[in-house]
């Protein structure tokens, strides 16, 4: 007889790993602290299709896994928010799922190219070609100007 209970619910939702880009979903999870008398044997991470569909196994259900990072790099669509959740398993079974985390399959945009300046009257006009957005909407741009005294203005 095992005197134990199900593991605790994870305290944090899954969150974006630095390896995520427009072709890969990479997720971090945190350790579940309360195992209630039986060691954690697996972390089951689940992911949807990026369109709000059903969750499917990313890792840790069919085969036990204690990895704190999950990676999906096949059949990933750029520019979508993927939903992820996870739960812990011990000898008694699975605990409750975490809150849902959302990961956008995108990267930082490229740097602008073909920058030009022209002087019109007493104004300087700066223009550039929009860079490749890496699967995410570019919402703002920042211009820094260095004057002759070495001071930077934004």
Image (cartoon, helix red, strand yellow):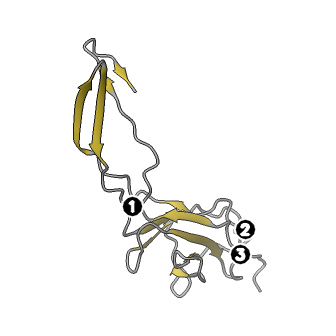
Which class describes the residues within 10 Å of circle 1: few (<14), some (14-19), or many (20+)? Answer: few
Residue plotted at (52% across, 79% down): 49
Above or below: residue 121 compared with residue 58: above
Label disc, if present, on residue 95 of the rendered structure: 3
Name the element at disc 3. loop
Residue plotted at (76% across, 76% down): 4
Q: Which of 3 and 154 is in front in this view?
A: 154
Q: Which residue lies furthest to the top in this view?
A: 149
The residue at which mark 1 appears reads as 19
Decide if residue 131 is on the left or right side of residue 66.
left
C-beta proximity under 8 Å, tags 2 and 3: yes
Which quarter of the picture shows residue 132? bottom left
Count numbered badges in the picture: 3
Label disc, if present, on residue 8 of the rendered structure: 2
Looking at the rendering, in which quadrant would you find the C terminus? top left
Q: Nearer the viewer, residue 58 or 10?
A: 58
């Amino acid at each position: 007889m095992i005197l134990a209970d199900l593991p605790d619910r994870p305290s944090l939702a899954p969150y974006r790993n630095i390896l995520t880009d427009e072709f890969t979903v990479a997720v971090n999870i945190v350790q579940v602290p309360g195992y209630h008398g039986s060691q954690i044997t697996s972390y089951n991470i689940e992911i949807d299709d990026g369109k709000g569909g059903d969750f499917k196994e990313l890792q840790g259900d069919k085969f036990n896994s204690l990895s704190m990072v999950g990676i999906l790099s096949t059949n990933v669509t750029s520019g979508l928010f993927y939903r992820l959740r996870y739960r812990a398993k011990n000898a008694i079974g699975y605990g409750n799922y975490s809150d849902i985390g959302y990961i956008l399959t995108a990267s930082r945009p490229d740097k602008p190219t073909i920058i030009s300046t022209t002087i019109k009257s007493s104004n300087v006009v700066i223009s550039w070609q929009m860079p490749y957005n890496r699967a995410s909407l570019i919402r703002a741009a920042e211009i820094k100007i260095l004057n002759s005294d070495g001071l930077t203005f934004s």
